[in-house]
Image (cartoon, rainbow, N blue to C red):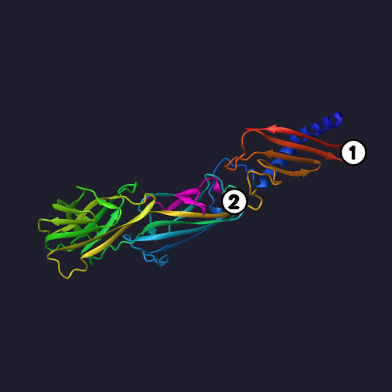
């Protein structure tokens, strides 16, 4: 019996020297779906994913095929994506999402992406002015290789600016002065044709989750060039503000013969992960009659959301606290090559990872004429 055991040890040394045992054990590990060899580097998954996009306006209409979407209007961009089955997804892997040519990101946005159990699967990030957003995964999809799909929803703006029309009297837009999305700069422009105006009052209603920032108003004088770009003449006109919470009155005490470009700021107190903010303004005073418009609405938005759905791989263990034979607190798998059978038993923690200590290889040698020999090899890290 001792000779048999020594022969077996010699065979194991030879097999190990040629990499047969180690390679075989590695195949077992990769086939079980429970032990995953994580590659050292993350990878881009775009070669394994299908992506479609759709753009909707504020009323929910599909405007994906319209080439001229207004720079001053908000739109809702939806990316739908699906990964090919069996492609691995590990922590740090990414998918790039290209913005359609008719929209743009006017602020930096970052938000978490969740599965249907509201577990974080990754995060999505896009920088202001970038043509691409990036979805970066964590390890939630490590053992899920079937039917992985999801959506990314992002608030965007159009790109088109009408650079010639002066068929307006008052206009309003807003933007985020920084990436924190805690302040909004609102811009009210009026009198593009340089009419003589007097006793002008702007009646401004700011939407929910906003408050006026005191002493933030400035009114520049100037004109708009042939491309509708405001050109300041270096002068300002005094403005007094009556603040009634969401209702603001801007009073101009002096006559106006120039174009006016007024800006002020509000605190944005809504959802820090994203939202839409509204503002409405109307104008009244002497010299206003028969104008194209005397009131206008404006909205500004940021952020978005994302969801990921998936199914477990067919060979993954449904209960990480039991092996496939129903024994508690360990997973045991086996395979055979020639006349060797290797079992390896290991403990799985709550995160689905191999626990340190109390793990072992179980070696079995069974051949006719020699009987069966079993021994265990502990391992840990």
Mark 1: few/some/many CA within 10 Å (<14, 14-19, 20+): few
Tell which residue pokes out farthest to the bottom in this image. 290
As helix, strand or loop, the secondary structure at mark 1 comes to loop
**Dot 2 corresponds to which residue?**
144
* Observer-nearest of 229 and 281: 281
Q: Is residue 322 above or below residue 1?
A: below
The answer to which of marks 2 and 1 sits earlier in the sequence is 2
Q: Is residue 147 left or right of residue 10?
A: left
Residues at marks 2 and 1, CA–CA distance in whole angstroms? 45 Å
Name the side, left or right, on which 351 lies relative to 31.
left
- Residue at image mark 1: 369
Name the image quarter holding residue 71.
bottom left
Secondary structure, mark 2, is loop
Expressed as whole percent of the image width and height from the top left, the position of residue 264 reads 23, 51
Q: Nearer the viewer, residue 255 or 181?
A: 181
Q: Quadrant of the C terminus?
A: top right
Q: Which residues are magenta?
A: 112-140
Does 139 lie within the magenta span? yes
Q: Is residue 126 something that shows in the picture?
A: no
């Amino acid at each position: 019996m001792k000779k048999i055991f020594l022969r077996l040890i010699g065979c194991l040394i030879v097999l190990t020297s040629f990499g047969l045992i180690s390679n075989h054990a590695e195949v077992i590990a990769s086939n079980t779906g429970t032990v995953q060899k994580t590659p050292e580097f993350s990878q881009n998954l775009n070669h394994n994913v299908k992506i479609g996009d759709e753009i909707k306006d504020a009323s929910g209409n599909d405007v994906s095929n319209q080439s001229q979407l207004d720079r001053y209007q908000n739109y809702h961009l939806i990316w739908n994506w699906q990964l090919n089955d069996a492609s691995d997804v590990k922590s740090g892997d990414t998918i790039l999402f290209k913005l359609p040519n008719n929209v743009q990101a006017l602020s930096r946005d970052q938000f978490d992406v969740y599965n249907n159990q509201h577990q974080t699967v990754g995060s999505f990030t896009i920088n202001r002015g970038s043509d691409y957003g990036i979805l970066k995964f964590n390890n939630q999809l490590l053992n899920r290789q079937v039917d992985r799909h999801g959506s990314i929803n992002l608030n965007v703006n159009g790109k088109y600016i009408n650079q010639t029309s002066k068929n307006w009297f008052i206009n309003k837009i807003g933007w985020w002065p920084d990436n924190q999305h805690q302040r909004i700069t609102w811009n009210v422009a009026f009198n593009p044709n340089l009419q003589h105006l007097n006793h002008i009052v702007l009646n401004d209603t700011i939407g929910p989750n906003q408050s006026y920032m005191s002493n933030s108003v400035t009114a520049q004088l100037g004109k708009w060039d042939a491309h509708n770009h405001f050109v300041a003449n270096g002068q300002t006109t005094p403005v007094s503000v009556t603040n009634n919470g969401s209702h603001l009155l801007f009073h101009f005490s002096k006559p106006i013969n120039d174009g006016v470009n007024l800006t002020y700021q509000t605190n944005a107190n809504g959802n820090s992960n994203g939202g839409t903010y509204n503002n409405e303004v109307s104008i009244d005073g002497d010299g206003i009659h028969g104008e194209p418009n005397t009131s206008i609405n404006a909205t500004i938005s940021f952020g978005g959301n994302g969801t990921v759905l998936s199914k477990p791989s067919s060979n993954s263990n449904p209960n990480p606290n039991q092996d496939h034979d129903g024994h508690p607190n360990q997973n045991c798998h086996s395979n055979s090559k020639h006349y060797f059978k290797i079992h390896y038993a290991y403990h799985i923690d709550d995160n689905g990872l191999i626990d340190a200590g109390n793990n072992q290889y179980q070696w079995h040698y069974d051949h006719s004429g020699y009987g069966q020999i079993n021994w265990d090899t502990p391992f840990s890290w």
